[in-house]
Amino acid sequence: MRSSRVRIIALSLSSLLVLSLTPALANPPKPTIAQIEAAKKAEAEKKKAADAAAARLNKANLTLRQLTAVATKARQKYEAAKRELAVAVKEAQAAAAAYNAAVSEVKAAHDAIGRLAANAYIMGGGFTDLDALLHSDGPQDLMDRLSTLNNLGEQNTTALFRFKAAEQVAKEAKKAADAAKLAQEVATKKVEATKIEADAARSAQQKEVDKLQKIQDQILKELLAARKTRVTLEQQRQLALLEEANANIADNTAIYTKIWPDIGFKGRSTSRSTPEMRAKAVEFAKKQVLARKPYVWGSEGPSTFDCSGLVYAAYRSAGLGWPNWDRLNSSLYFSFTKHVPISQLEPGDLLFYSYKGTVNSIHHISIYAGNGMMWEANSKGKGLLFSNIYSIKGLMPYGGRV
């Protein structure tokens, strides 16, 4: 019954780790329930902070959209005002031209009246009348005097009419041009001020949104890190418990075979490591053994190791990292490495030991050193060893090439 339960746990963890994208982190041996609960609490707090940051960012984005709409309308008004100003400038220019023409008309009328007065004098007209014309106090006084001179005839009347009409047109044209220009300048300044204010508000809100976005990105990053930590602790605890259970069963199981027969095991079709990586992994394992570092369940260094922890740390030091390489237990390493017959082993290949000759009953793993020897983290009692590959019974018929 216990063996069946271990098999189910192994298969469940195998499926979990094939799908998982969470790299393992260095943690104390066999994480405790308290550590996992603390990680869950930290993750929940980060989730709460992330939700609050998202709410603030959404509110700021809404305000930004509103201010952007205001700024857009202000710019549209400003552009319309500029177009109106261009029209007004043309109208003012036309009015100015009309005024100049009217002034010319006034001058022409004034000259005509002068000529009429001169002609009247030459032709024998009343000197008194001419004297009044020639000594008038300006154009208006002159026109008032001319209006009483009946002896100037029809030509005089026509000249007087033209003079008055021209002067009135000039006055109206000047008034219209000045009013149009003044009104447009006032409107343009007002709209431009509105545009500047709207653009400033939008710019300030954009900075606020950018700041909140940065905060939210950081909180989400921290949330993902907290989630990875929690998942990793849970996985490491389950892996350590499974490997420990298999080792305990192996200690109480009589294994009579030196090497198990092949019953159709499947592994990876390709290798992820290079010969140089495998050589570095062997050298790393050798240094840990010669340093007589102790054996501790669930540990992957740098001061203590268990069997799978030594294998993981050795290849990690050789440059093989996530996602190609992860912290697994012995049976999972057997499933996720390329199978190599024992007769074709090379230094750096992994060796596996099982108490029943099946994948889910693998309880130990080591690194092949060459010449029938291996580097291993054996047990709490024996520590890390350099030993013969057959010193432990129940060798699986295949090694694993990382």
Image (cartoon, rainbow, N blue to C red):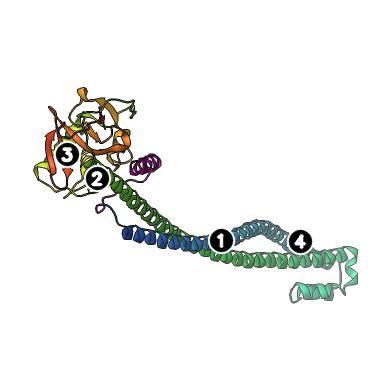
Residue 316 visible in image: no
Helix, strand or loop status at disc 2: helix
Helix, strand or loop status at disc 1: helix
- Report the residue at 22% width, 32% height from top: 394
Disc 1/disc 2 C-alpha distance (Å): 61 Å
Helix, strand or loop status at disc 3: strand
Disc 3/disc 1 C-alpha distance (Å): 61 Å
Highlighted range, magenta: 1-29
As displayed, is residue 118 above or below residue 231? below
Mark 3 or mark 1, earlier in chain:
1
Mark 3 or mark 4, earlier in chain:
4
| Residue 105: image tag | 4
Q: Nearer the viewer, mark 4 or mark 1?
A: 1
Label 1 belongs to which residue? 62
Query: How many residues crowd around disc 1 within 10 Å: few (fewer than 14), some, or many (20 or more)?
Result: few
Mark 2 or mark 4, earlier in chain:
4
Mark 2 or mark 3, earlier in chain:
2
Image coords of residue 324 (percent x, y): 31, 37
Label 3 belongs to which residue? 376
Q: Quadrant of the C terminus?
A: top left
- Report the residue at 74% width, 68% height from top: 171
Disc 4/disc 1 C-alpha distance (Å): 64 Å
Label 2 belongs to which residue? 248
Mark 1 or mark 2, earlier in chain:
1
Identity, as a three-letter code, of the amino acid under mark 1: Leu
